[in-house]
Amino acid sequence: MSAKALGQYELWFVAGSQEMYGEEVLAAVAADAGEIAAALDAAAALPVRVVLREVATTPEAIRRLCLEANAADACAGLILWMHTFSPAQMWIAGLSILDKPLLHLHTQFNRALPWAQIDMNYMNTHQSAHGDREFAFLETRMRLARKTVVGHWSDEATLARIGHWSRAACGWREAAGLTVARLGDNMRDVAVTEGDKVEAHLRLGITVSGFGVGDLVEVMDAVGEDERQRLVAEYEDQYDLVPELRSGGDRRDSLVVAARIEAGLREFLTAGGFGAFTDTFQDLHGLRQLPGIAVQRLMADGFGFGGEGDWKTAALVRIVKLMATGLQGGTSFMEDYTYDLAGEVPLVLGSHMLEVCPSIAAARPSCEIHPLSIGAREDPVRLVFDAAPGPAFMFSMLDMGDRFRLLANEVDVIAPPQELPKLPVARAVWKPKPDFATAAEAWLVAGGPHHSVFSAALDTEVLADFAAIAGLELLLIDEHTTSRDFANEVRWNQVYYRLAAGL
Ligand code: MN
């Protein structure tokens, strides 16, 4: 079996039953569960390990199993399946204390019904259709958040849905304990990048730690000549340097400054155990350039980033990158910038001042230096490229005051229809789904931010699963969205989430 992309995490596979059936049936249940667990563990669609647990037959054993799951750091969630009938009151004590994500797999061991052979013994052993209904009633009665997946356990579609959920469960593990370093505060007077950090800690487990830029500069100044030269050599190896940045070029010094910033930032984040960070061009004391290539390369190595103090997007970039581990397609911080409304199909040009992750690049980036009209610092070095064409999504989190809202829009990235010889930043050009006007209207009606996570790696089902695990609202704009239904969903959600939050 090949190594799992998120092999540090495991799902526990539990078949429910009861002691009444006797040893022979329970042995068959255990063997069948073992076969299913092994198939899930081997499935390429699941990036995590799947561990078979004992057949659950008593309230006390179920309670103990749930306690154990809560305490197991590697356990990202539980997959439950009732092979036979498991009287569901047995599950109340356990499920009441379970704090790991739950997937109810409604499957059946045998795909085909043996019409000519079926007898009461077979009916007794293979009654998921019946047992899972008893179990689902209790889950619903308990108002348990869970994902329900229906289908034979060997079907690709079933495995894909479990795989999506398992990525979301890993994202949830990543959020718990994720720390964002905020270098400088929010960009002055900007509304959408602000938010309630205590609520983020309570809801998602994310903490945000503020630092003065001087704290970074101190680490940066300690970067040795060797490390700077090593990074410069890496730049030469991985990117096409413009002549002025090459060895002997008249702006070579700026490349060395950029390398120093990268080395310092990397050391600062790694030593502090941070998974994401923000900075702001309004607070760069002691930095000669706004970090450009440094931020881009740190994102490519898995760090989350948000510009202008945007810690919410920074955290989400990190979480999406974790959830996308091992998949084709990159993930980046992104900002809707400007439109082309002249063509038959309107287009969106997304970019940022500098900080777009090269994991989304269509080809080898070029490493360039250009002036930046804001920040009042020296010209920053940056990587310039076009995003690779293909399906992708934008994903954002906004603070509604009483809760967080997640918002996503599926898009199709295309190659820029024309060259952009004077645009000195990395960019993506996309067509939003279902169409430009509906998508932009929905995004604005939902209060969607200008910053987002752009990802070409994940199915949006993963985002929906993540939102469900976190208990957060997700508004998804996709091919099925209409303006009227979307506006209604926003209106109704406002009521639902207020009521669901309680007093
Ligand atoms: Mn911005």
Image: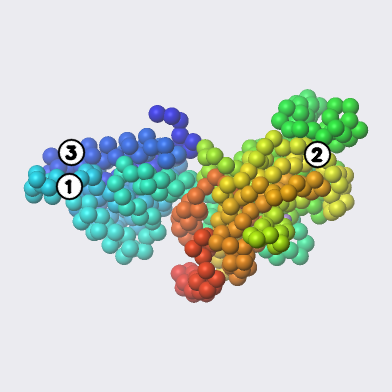
Report the disc number at residue 27: 3
Report the disc number at residue 445: none
Q: State left or right for residue 406 relative to residue 80.
A: right
Horizontal and vertical percent position of residue 334: 67, 52
Q: Quadrant of ligand 1?
A: bottom right
Q: Earlier in the sequence, mark 1 or mark 3?
A: 3
Q: Is residue 388 above or below residue 256?
A: below
For the point 71% across and 59% down, the residue is 340
Q: Earlier in the sequence, mark 1 or mark 2?
A: 1
Q: State left or right for residue 430 relative to residue 479.
A: right
Q: State left or right for residue 126 relative to residue 491.
A: left
Horizontal and vertical percent position of residue 212: 77, 49
Report the disc number at residue 113: 1
Q: Earlier in the sequence, mark 3 or mark 2?
A: 3
For the point 50% across and 50% down, the residue is 459
Q: How many other residues sit within 10 Å of disc 1, few (<14), some (14-19) or many (≥20)?
A: few
Q: Image quadrant for the N terminus?
A: top left
Residue at the farthest front position:
344
Q: Is residue 352 above or below residue 31?
A: below
Horizontal and vertical percent position of residue 236: 76, 28
For the point 38% across and 56% down, the residue is 146
Report the disc number at residue 368: 2
Q: Amino acid at mark 1?
A: Leu
Task: Confirm whether residue 213 shows in the render.
Answer: no
Q: How many other residues sit within 10 Å of disc 2, few (<14), some (14-19) or many (≥20)?
A: many
Q: Nearer the viewer, residue 11 or 485?
A: 485
Residue at the farthest right position:
250
